[in-house]
Amino acid sequence: MAEARTIGSLPVPNVQVLAETCNGGGEHVPERYLRTEASSDEVIASGDSNLAIPIIDLGKLLDPQSSEEECVKLGSACQNWGFFQLINNHGVADEMTGNLMSDIVEFFKQPLEAKKECSQQPDSLEGYGQAFVVSEDQKLDWADMLYLQVQPSESRDLRFWPTRPASFRHSLDVYASETAKLACRLLEFMAKGVGAEPSMLRGMFEGQGQLQGMRANYYPPCQQAADRVLGLSPHTDACGLTLLRQLNGDVQGLQVKKDGKWFAVDAMDGSFIVNVGDALEILSNGRFKSVEHRAVINPNKERISVAMFHYPCQDLILGPLPEFVKGDKVRYRSTSYKDFMMQYFAAKLDGRGHLERLKLE
Ligand code: OGA
Ligand code: NI
């Protein structure tokens, strides 16, 4: 009998099967991983820049000469795609990024037993395992992950923080504070880009109650059935803004939904893939879009990605900000952010379903 986990008062049965444990050479892929939609959906290949997520240059955002124009481009990326690639001197030194990435590779390279020292526990969402597994008959994602709450620093639960490699904790600490700063800067430019007061959004994310989480995703190859498994089910992110780095640049995996079609993302070397999450769609009264995305699997190559999630401050009642409602109607119900998060984590991933339930139209 699976052990029940609880999130708040919601029971979450522990019915995971780690992808890594059933990925031996020619072995049969368990039924729980196979799905029909993975191969039947239309996918637009990357290549034509008009059919790809927009590229935003932080250098241009910071240069007074080009800032205004780049801000508008950023604003429109967040309204039309909900996603963009951020390039050029984004202030998170390559060395810091490299340190964390290599520590994450080291972590995942360890034997399963060693990783299990960081396994999820019945009382928490953090740790090594799979996420959003709530029933025995739901399909599973072909990926294992490590989720950690990183900020505020007093909320860190070190039971789940790897001790091997020895540099892991320090690398994450440094990387997290740099990406949090970058996220706040971007929020300011995004507000500017749609003609709102620049400090408006940033203020909801910055300061003492600042919340940040990290999810490292490990997608093993799947020789037997890469086109019939999914690395990560279609979902939106619950946070405000996600900054994602992918490690193996030449292995595609992330796909973004636009106008009913999936667009493959070609991650450029050294770029961040940035996306709007549910909380930001709500705060902006729907101006910025929290867009569905998923990850597919390569038959021969593994892929590793690291997502930093930036959540609005803890005690917030989450609802549209007056600045974004001006001249429009209120499009989302307000809810306590804690309840919102609890519901998100207690369900399986469900495209935009979670967000749609808060819509007022
Ligand atoms: C996520 C996510 C995509 C990827 O972790 O929420 O969407 O490419 N990851 O790993
Ligand atoms: Ni995501």
Image: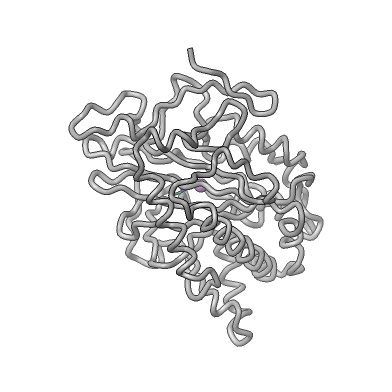
In the image, what residue occupies the spot 49% across and 44% down? Answer: 162
Instruction: Give coordinates of residue 234: x percent, y percent.
Output: 47, 40
Q: Nearer the viewer, residue 263 or 93?
A: 93
In the image, what residue occupies the spot 59% across and 48% down? Answer: 213
* Number of numbered callouts drawn: 0
- 252 relative to 240 in the view: left or right: left
Q: Is residue 217 above or below residue 65?
A: above
Instruction: Give coordinates of residue 61: x percent, y percent.
Output: 59, 77
Instruction: Give coordinates of residue 102: x percent, y percent.
Output: 40, 57
Q: Is residue 199 above or below residue 140?
A: below
In the image, what residue occupies the spot 69% across and 40% down? Answer: 359
- 28 relative to 127 in the view: left or right: left
Visual colour scheme: one colour
Residue 221 image-quadrant placement: top left
- 268 relative to 341 in the view: left or right: left
- 334 relative to 2 in the view: left or right: right
